Image (cartoon, grey):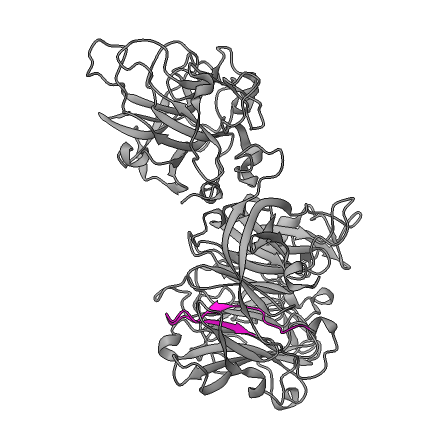
Amino acid sequence: MTSANTGGQGVRRRNVATAVAVGSALCLSLVSSPAVAEGEPLLNPLPDPTPSTLAIEVEEFAQLPESSPRQEPTDQRLVRHNRINHIGEIPDGSGRLYVPDMNGTMYVLGEDDGGYVQYLDVRAAFADHIHDHAGLGTGFGFVEFHPEFAENGKFYTVHTEARGALEEHEPDFPEYGGTAYHSVITEWTTDDPAAETFAGTSREVMRIPFAGRVHTVQQIEFNPTAEPGDEDYGLLYMLVGDGGNGVGNSNPQDLATPHGKIFRIDPLGDDSENGQYGVPGTNPFVDTPGALGEIYAVGMRDPHRISWDPQGDNRMFLGHIGEWQVESIYEVRAGDNFGWSEREGPFLAENRQIYPLPANDDEFGFTYPVAAYDHNRDPGQRGDAGVAVAGGYVYRGDIPLLKGRYLFADLVRGHVYSTIAGEMNRESGRLAPIEHLKVVADGKETTFQELVGDKRVDLRFGSDDEGDLYLVAKANGKIWRITGAHKVPPENEAPGGSAVLPGLSGDVVAHYTFDSPATDPAIETDQGRSGTDITLVNGGEQMRVSDEAYPGAGLALQTQQVSPATAGNDDWKAGVYEAGGVGSLSAFNQADQITVMGWFRTTGEHPAPNSNTANPDDRFNAIGLAGVLSGSSDGHGVRALLEVINVDGELKVVALGRRLDDGSSWTYAADAPWQEVLTDEWVHLTATFDFAAGEMQLFMNGEKLPGGYTTAGDPWRVDGTGTSATDPAGIKIGGSYPQDTREQNPCNCRMDDLMFLDSVPTDGQIKAQFERYGRD
């Protein structure tokens, strides 16, 4: 179905091979020459989700009635309490929630009490043709409300038809490999959007043919982050599976077929071939001869659920159910090709097995997952690690420990998983780590298998407009709401030890929680990979104070000026110093990137009185926070420093870096007054230094701090060679000298979770690292 709309300029496209005839159909293959598997198939290619120290707290929200397919099921997996598969909010401001039961009923629930009414009987409306007794995805599959439902009363459903429907109705797309089922998209218009039950009219929007009864049309969804006037507003996304046959044909790679695709249409338009909907001119293949203009992305087996991150760039994520080995989460962009059936997850697929990617893989232009897990346990463990993924949501609600996490599930096992949205970065070339969350109900740790009383849970996620997350289970027809989260530290783990974002843990050269004293309590043990212990100068053990920077943080470090009126060297500070270089910090030797981050709050007067002069009104012109010294430093020369210094006569929070031992320093200063950044409340600050690119940046509580460079030009003399080939002379915390020589720029502060990395995280990772602490 090719649209007459010829827009879509500027949208990225894949290269399409020359069209070839297959029977009477036009086949546009996106894979010009499939790679051939070499070597042995991969049997356990991905790590299992890591058992998490994070527990979600759930409470029962609703119990919906029993239901069954119209005919006796031929598949016992359809014998459930009911077949509820989603929960969402009607976009009319009423707070009402809707739940489809695949056995035919759409329920509407109250916002708070979990009470329900039967809003619409979809099965009764299509009683002559609806098919719901064979095939896991058949029946009343999904419902989605138009964003202007309160005004236009329109919502959309998808259901499966068979039998006489195939004789009475022609599908809207060519039939490839025979047809036994239709997925039908219907538009409903209610007479009264505020009514408790439906009364109104309906019309057919689209009919898609399938040879198989699985992997038909799953979800239909409007982008909830799109606003009126946005290009995506009011466009309906449709997840069209491969019909169960994609493993044996090229349909998912064929732009002339609907199978194995994500569609995007305008349900209120009329320029489609059947005249019942519109094809957006910005869709990526509208100008490709012979391609279906409805296609937004290609190369899928069973696209299960999509959702959009409510913050940042509003990225779209897809949970994709694999064939034999891999369950995947993708970030979806227009024109993407996820590779099925040439690829399964990030692997070559052939003969129902997976293999490493070929050496020439870049030639094919496939997009790979941002997170994935496989079906096999690690050696020595029993049972499947995974069966089928249920896509979820990036949480941006009010539960601090969940903010910035993408929560999803294995729908069969009922396991709840999460990964960090900031680590789901398709440009990074690596998969985000996945955690297996604990579940707590009524104050007791449990599992969803225990909550439903069945090993097959059939668990899926839903969300309301406030960002609250829900879980629905077919096994017992119940809905739970996630009400909170808390940490459950494993045995023998130091407080705060799990605070590091998994994707950054390998980059943390040094990490100080101030909960890990050595035999000498004046020595703090490094929790990073370098083992660089530091000294708590002058104050020793007294510098460890009870003050939680974030929930469960444990102790913090106190630094301070001890004798404001007396010149001396008794101020409390911390660090390590060796004039010839600290060998354990060799990761910073010729490093291209460094990051300094940690928690800070003030506890006294700033800037501190200058005890080195006779004038009691003199003040130091800086406030020492934390940094890495250069290789030739005597305590002044810094490689990467987060500090408050004087910039053009005014104190500013800065990132100050020196790339070369004999070179100039360069400063990036925050625009905001320093007192608005560094206050008596805990704040998480980050300074990043990209020496190769010649860039610095400051962040406060995971967000960029507006600012600029204090010197024009290129003081670093950037030429891509990295920093000087010397080990740093040390780390300084809380003053100009980590070694005990004299008082200079003291900080009357508390600090915690100071980290020094040999990388520059992405903006998303920095935000995710802050959100991981669970503090607003």
Residue 105 falls in image quadrant: bottom right
**Image position of 546 (left or right of 460):** left
**Image position of 104 (left or right of 360):** left
Tell me if I can see residue 576 in this picture: yes
Can you give x and y, in whole percent of width and height, for residue 724 in the image? 48, 20
Where is 145 relative to 711, above or below?
A: below
Where is 128 relative to 537, above or below?
A: below
The magenta-colored residue range is 80-100
Q: Is residue 253 magenta?
A: no
Question: Between 406 and 720, which is closer to the camera in this rendering?
Answer: 406
**Image position of 499 (left or right of 20):** left
Where is 119 relative to 221, above or below?
A: below
Q: Residue most toward the right?
A: 40
Identify the residue shown where x is 40% and y is 24%.
558
Where is 44 relative to 113, above or below?
A: above
Identify the residue shown where x is 37% and y is 76%.
150
Residue 245 falls in image quadrant: bottom right
Which SS does the magenta portion mostly show? loop
Can you give x and y, in whole percent of width and height, for residue 117 in the image? 49, 79
Quadrant including the N terminus: bottom right
Quadrant including the C terminus: top left
Tell me if I can see residue 430 in this picture: no
Residue 533 falls in image quadrant: top right
Can you give x and y, in whole percent of width and height, for residue 143 in the image? 52, 74
Question: Between 139 and 441, which is closer to the camera in this rendering?
Answer: 441
Can you give x and y, in whole percent of width and height, for residue 216 in the image? 63, 72
